[in-house]
Image (spheres, rainbow, N blue to C red):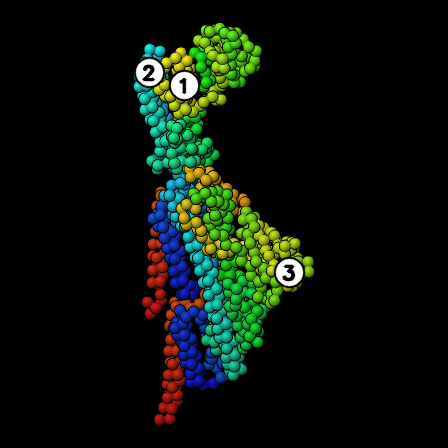
């Protein structure tokens, strides 16, 4: 076949172009470290890489969420530890205050110590995080959730919600507990609490209640024991039932429970016995009740009975509150553990994503560098052959 | 018969042969030049030789093959240049839509952790601004491409019309020359063939050789050159969509008639037009669909929440409404406007609508990609409902059979998305009036995994499939282009083998004809010597 001179030049130039393009392409890959520089280099890999890097970003996003969650929960945990200490000290003081040997002045000093503890606990209940948000306010975390009103009673103004964060694709975790759950609740399954009626005038003191038979059909209901004194004979009835003779020191049994009452009740005195949830569950109300009674001078047997009964109720309530705080704390601890578990899974997942991304778009340097040298040789060969062929001309010889 | 006349005929022939060779050498690099051969023949009477013809080495069949291969290559070339721009645009992983979207959702995550924190709220607004800005900037790049294609169609049309005029003029000159001397000058023929090759690079035209004339027709059979008469092509505003320039045929009366774009495959113009309808429109629509899905889906959830001031959430992003164009020929017809009813139903396609029965309010609706067509009927409220869209007709009594409308539901959406919420307190993170409530923020954050786009893909999946599709398209074009390049190269070398100049060959001819000349000169010298000898006999 005839070959025209133009063809010789054109083909030489176009093969150099081709070689140069290939050479540049490998060079660009090596410079960027990526095999897929543009989507067209490997459309499937490029599309998959978008998906993998989003999954990676989402995993990182949840890691950030877990950092916030861990912060909140750790703060809560340390506050709850102090609260538990506070309740224990209050309990100790109550035991001290219940002693019959104490004078009014001694009791008053116990009361003032107890007031200190109440203020400390109030402080803890109104604790804020680093951003000034109240830990125990529920969603109403912009203002202090526990407020003392004019009468000295402490009111909860937060709500019953708990802030939740999505800490993993399918797990939304509460990262706080509201004040109601922490300071105004008792754990489920807590036993009975007894409380003497407000207007009791007699000297009856109760001990208990104790549980005899949890399978009793009435077990779980609330009971009221009413005393009546008719012509010097003291009788009682349970929930308005039949009157029974009262014998000081003998246990009164009802609904699978037993309550021992000593002393002499007056006509109209009463004792309420109910599951803890139905009685006062507010820690601050308990403390106020105890402080009030400790601050009241004891003059009569009835006063002493009231002191005994109130402190007995308060001690049981404090035990329940402490249980509640400890339960909450355990749940916080469990959540912190869960965060750690999820974190370590996520770290593994991040590694996998990185590996997948790298497999999809990153360059195999060994292969690329060998390509690079091979293409360099190709380019040089094309240049050499072009130079040689273009030098060959009959005109050089005539 | 004379030794002198024989010698002189040889000298003349040698000179002509040398001229031919010199002309070949001189034009070795001239585009469109076909090498020439001096055809030598014995004189019919009186001996001696003559040049019977200076023959142009040109093969119409191979030339046509080469023209169509080069036209196809030019088409793929211009397609590739365009599609690789989008390819590069989507390649940027650091600042692309995917990256800013990740930032946005990560800011929302920060908001769930601190729903009343002004810094977290500002973060959401800031990343939303950069997300919408990214959508707009991508779209404005694509819009610029649309504009440039409009401009290029205009300029290509001018070039093609000019070339057609030149070819008609050459037809004229060639027939004049032929009637004068019976022979057409090779230079004119070369020029004309070269112009045909050039026009093929711009557009696919069909060549019909009729006597000494070249007649050209464009794809649907309309004459571009008929003998010495040239017709024009021009760019015109599309009657379907005023923002776009289409190819129009200008007849002898100067009327413009739109040519069917499907007819254009080859040449730079074919590449541009194919790129525009196959890739550019689709990418812009898909991006728009993502913008609508993000905006509408996000707004829905945001409006379900409560902001820091205790008010219900407002719209967070602006959502643009579909564009409906009434065909330029719908004079006095009903006007149509569109609204997005359910963004999950959107198909991401454009639609053509034609009134098929005005009295019954019946429309023939077809997707522009040809994937589906169906009939839609006006409901009691004078509305058409399909694919998540609602179209309202202003006055159904003005409907006329055959009137056409074009509907572009999401073409402008990516370019028009914006962040409406500017005040941090207006972000509705809560579902109650409590400042610490983060439930709506959690729901908003969760939207990143919800199938918002067309009800079947999350935002990120939709983006990934866009990247994959553009990459695929670009890849296919590259592969086709490189195959076409080697085919064209081969045909070019065949064509050059016939018509191209080889300098070695010409060098040999130069020597050969030089010796030929010298030999004939010698003949004359010998003739003179012989004559002298005779004359000297008398002395």
Quarter holding residue B211:
bottom right
Looking at the image, the residue that sits furthest to the right is: B359
- Chain containing the residue with disc 1: A
In three-dimensional space, the C-alpha distance between marks 3 and 1, rounded to whole angstroms, equals 81 Å
Q: Is residue B493 visible?
A: no
Q: Nearer the viewer, residue B130 or B179?
A: B130
For mark 3, what is the residue? B396
Q: Is residue B354 visible?
A: yes
Label 2's element?
helix
- Chain containing the residue with disc 2: A
Q: Which mark is residue A104?
A: 2
Q: Mark 2 touching mark 3, by CB under 8 A?
A: no
Q: Position of residue B483 (x, y in %)?
A: 48, 55
Q: Nearer the viewer, residue B411 or A150?
A: A150
Q: Nearer the viewer, residue A358 or B348?
A: B348
Q: Position of residue B448 (x, y in %)?
A: 47, 42
In three-dimensional space, the C-alpha distance between marks 1 and 2, rounded to whole angstroms, equals 19 Å
Quarter holding residue A206:
top left
Q: Mark 3 touching mark 1, by CB under 8 A?
A: no
Give the residue displayed 36% in from the left and 45% down from the top: A33
Label 3's element?
helix
Give the residue displayed 42% in from the left and 36% down from the top: A140
Q: Who comes first in sequence, dot 1 or dot 2?
A: 2
Give the residue displayed 52% in from the left and 66% down from the top: B237
Whether residue A343 is situated above or below residue B89 in the rendered picture: above
Circle 1 Cα neighbour tier, 10 Å, few/some/many (<14 / 14–19 / ≥20)? many
């Amino acid at each position: 076949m005839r070959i025209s001179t133009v063809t010789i030049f054109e083909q030489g130039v176009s093969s150099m172009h081709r070689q140069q393009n290939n050479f540049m392409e490998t060079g660009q890959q090596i410079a960027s470290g990526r095999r897929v520089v543009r989507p067209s280099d490997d459309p499937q890999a490029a599309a998959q890489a978008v998906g993998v890097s989003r999954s990676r970003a989402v995993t990182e996003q949840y890691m950030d969420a877990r950092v916030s969650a861990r912060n909140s929960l750790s703060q809560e945990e340390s506050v709850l530890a102090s609260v538990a200490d506070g309740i224990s000290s209050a309990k100790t003081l109550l035991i001290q205050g219940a002693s019959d040997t104490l004078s009014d002045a001694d009791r008053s000093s116990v009361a003032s110590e107890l007031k200190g503890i109440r203020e400390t606990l109030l402080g803890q209940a109104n604790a804020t995080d680093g951003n000034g948000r109240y830990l125990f306010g529920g969603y109403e975390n912009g203002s202090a959730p526990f407020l003392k009103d004019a009468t000295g009673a402490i009111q909860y103004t937060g709500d019953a919600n708990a802030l939740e964060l999505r800490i993993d694709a399918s797990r939304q975790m509460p990262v706080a507990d509201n004040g109601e759950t922490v300071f105004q609740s008792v754990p489920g399954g807590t036993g009975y609490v007894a409380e003497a009626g407000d207007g009791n005038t007699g000297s009856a003191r109760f001990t208990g209640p104790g549980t005899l038979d949890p399978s009793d059909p009435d077990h779980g209901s609330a009971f009221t024991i009413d005393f009546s004194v008719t012509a010097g004979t003291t009788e009682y009835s349970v929930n308005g039932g039949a009157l029974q003779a009262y014998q000081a020191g003998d246990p009164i049994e009802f609904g699978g429970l037993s309550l021992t009452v000593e002393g002499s009740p007056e006509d109209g005195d009463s004792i309420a016995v109910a599951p803890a949830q139905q009685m006062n569950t507010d820690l601050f109300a308990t403390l106020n009740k105890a402080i009030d009674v400790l601050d009241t001078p004891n003059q009569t047997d009835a006063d002493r009975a009231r002191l005994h009964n109130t402190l007995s109720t308060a001690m049981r309530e404090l035990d329940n509150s402490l249980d509640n705080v400890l339960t909450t704390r355990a749940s916080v601890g469990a959540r912190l553990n869960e965060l750690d578990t999820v974190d370590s899974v996520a770290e593994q997942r991040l590694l996998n994503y990185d590996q997948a991304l790298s497999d999809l778009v990153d360059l195999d340097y060994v292969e690329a560098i060998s390509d690079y040298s091979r293409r360099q040789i190709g380019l040089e060969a094309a240049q050499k052959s072009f130079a040689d062929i273009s030098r060959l001309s009959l005109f050089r010889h005539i | 018969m004379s030794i002198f006349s024989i010698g002189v005929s040889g000298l003349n022939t040698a000179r002509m042969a040398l001229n031919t060779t010199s002309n070949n050498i001189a034009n070795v690099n001239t585009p469109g030049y076909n090498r020439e051969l001096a055809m030598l023949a014995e004189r019919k009477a009186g001996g001696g030789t003559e040049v019977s013809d200076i023959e142009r080495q040109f093969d119409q069949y191979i030339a046509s093959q080469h023209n169509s291969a080069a036209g196809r290559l030019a088409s793929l070339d211009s397609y590739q240049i365009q599609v690789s721009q989008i390819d590069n645009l989507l390649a940027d992983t650091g600042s692309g839509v995917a990256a800013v979207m990740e930032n946005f959702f990560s800011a929302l995550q920060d908001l769930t952790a601190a729903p009343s924190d002004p810094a977290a709220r500002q973060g959401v607004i800031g990343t939303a601004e950069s997300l919408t800005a990214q959508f707009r900037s991508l779209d404005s790049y694509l819009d610029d491409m649309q504009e440039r294609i409009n401009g290029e169609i205009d300029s290509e049309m001018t070039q093609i019309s000019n070339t057609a005029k030149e070819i008609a003029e050459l037809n004229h000159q060639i027939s004049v020359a032929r009637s004068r001397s019976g022979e057409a000058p090779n230079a004119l023929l070369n020029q004309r063939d070269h112009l045909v090759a050039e026009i093929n690079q711009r557009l696919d035209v069909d060549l019909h050789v009729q006597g000494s004339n070249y007649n050209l027709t464009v794809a649907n059979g309309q004459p571009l050159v008929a003998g010495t008469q040239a017709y024009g092509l021009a760019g015109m505003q599309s009657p379907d969509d005023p923002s776009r320039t289409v190819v129009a045929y200008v007849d002898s009366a100067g009327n413009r008639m739109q040519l069917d774009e499907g007819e254009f495959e080859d040449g730079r113009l074919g590449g541009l037009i194919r790129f525009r309808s196959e890739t550019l429109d689709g990418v812009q629509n898909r991006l728009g669909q993502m913008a609508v899905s993000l905006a509408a889906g996000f707004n829905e959830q945001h409006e379900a929440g409560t902001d820091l001031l205790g008010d219900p959430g407002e719209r967070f992003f602006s959502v643009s409404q579909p564009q409906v164009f009434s065909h330029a020929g719908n004079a006095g017809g009903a006007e149509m406007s569109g609204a997005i009813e359910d963004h999950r139903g959107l198909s991401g396609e454009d639609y053509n609508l034609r009134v098929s029965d005005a009295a019954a309010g019946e429309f023939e609706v077809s997707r522009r990609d040809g994937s589906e067509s169906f009939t839609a009927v006006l409901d009691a409220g004078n509305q058409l409902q399909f694919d998540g869209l609602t179209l309202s007709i202003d006055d159904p009594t003005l409907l006329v059979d055959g009137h056409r409308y074009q509907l572009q539901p999401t073409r402008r959406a990516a370019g028009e998305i914006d962040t409406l919420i500017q005040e941090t307190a207006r972000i509705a993170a809560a579902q109650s009036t409590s400042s610490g409530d983060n439930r709506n923020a959690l729901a908003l954050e969760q939207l990143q995994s919800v199938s918002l786009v067309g009800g079947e893909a999350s935002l990120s999946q939709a983006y990934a499939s866009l990247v994959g599709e553009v990459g695929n398209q670009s890849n296919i074009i590259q592969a086709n282009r490189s195959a076409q390049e080697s085919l064209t190269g081969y045909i070019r070398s065949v064509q050059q083998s016939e018509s191209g100049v080889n300098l070695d060959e010409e060098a040999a001819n130069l020597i050969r004809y030089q010796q030929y000349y010298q030999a004939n000169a010698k003949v004359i010298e010998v003739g003179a010597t012989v004559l002298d000898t005779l004359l000297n006999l008398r002395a």
